[in-house]
Amino acid sequence: MQDVATTMMSGKGQVVIPESIRNSMGWGPGTRFVVAGKDDTLVLKALVAPDLSSIKGLLAKVRAEAKRAGLKKKHLTAAIVKARAGARV
């Protein structure tokens, strides 16, 4: 860890992340976190949206697998209709 600081929990369970740590981590208002705790340790992991290029890469892999499996758009449409109707696909 780069910075170390102390903080305190409020009566509402709120904890202020010290400004020096927020700045060094690049966290601002609206930053969302996954929170995990065990024993006396709490971990905050900032949620970061994937960049567009990684989504495009994943989409290309999915399309290749669908093509390899012989899936067509009509198959996807039928699966969506069944799912929305509450039926098992």
Image (tube, rainbow, N blue to C red):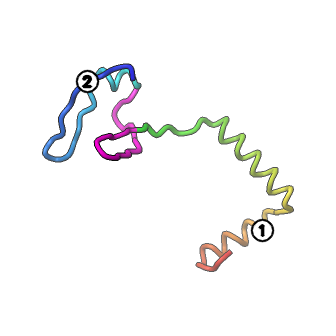
Q: Would you name the residue on which mark 1 appears?
A: 75
Q: Is residue 60 above or below residue 24?
A: below
The disc labelled 1 sits on which kind of residue? Answer: His
Q: Is residue 65 above or below residue 22?
A: below
Q: Is residue 6 above or below residue 40?
A: above
User: Which span of residues is magenta-colored?
Assistant: 26-44
Q: How far is the residue under mark 2 from the one under mark 1?
A: 55 Å
SS for dot 2: loop
SS for dot 1: helix
Image spot of residue 85 (x, y percent):
60, 78
- Residue drawn at x 86%, y 62% as measured from the top left: 70
The image quadrant of residue 43 is top left
Q: Earlier in the sequence, mark 2 or mark 1?
A: 2
Classify mark 1: residues with Cα within 10 Å, few (<14), some (14-19) or many (20+): few
- Which quarter shows the C terminus? bottom right
- Which quarter shows the N terminus? top left
- Residue 79: within the magenta? no
Numbered label attached to residue 5: 2
Q: Is residue 67 above or below residue 74?
A: above
- Residue drawn at x 72%, y 68% as measured from the top left: 77
Q: Give whichever of 45, 76 is nearer the camera.
A: 45
Image spot of residue 2 (x, y percent):
38, 19
- Residue drawn at x 41%, y 44% as measured from the top left: 34
Q: Give whichever of 84, 50 is nearer the camera.
A: 50
The disc labelled 2 sits on which kind of residue? Answer: Ala
Count every numbered label the image shows and give the total.
2
Numbered label attached to residue 67: none
Residue 1 left/right relative to 80: left
Image spot of residue 39 (x, y percent):
31, 46
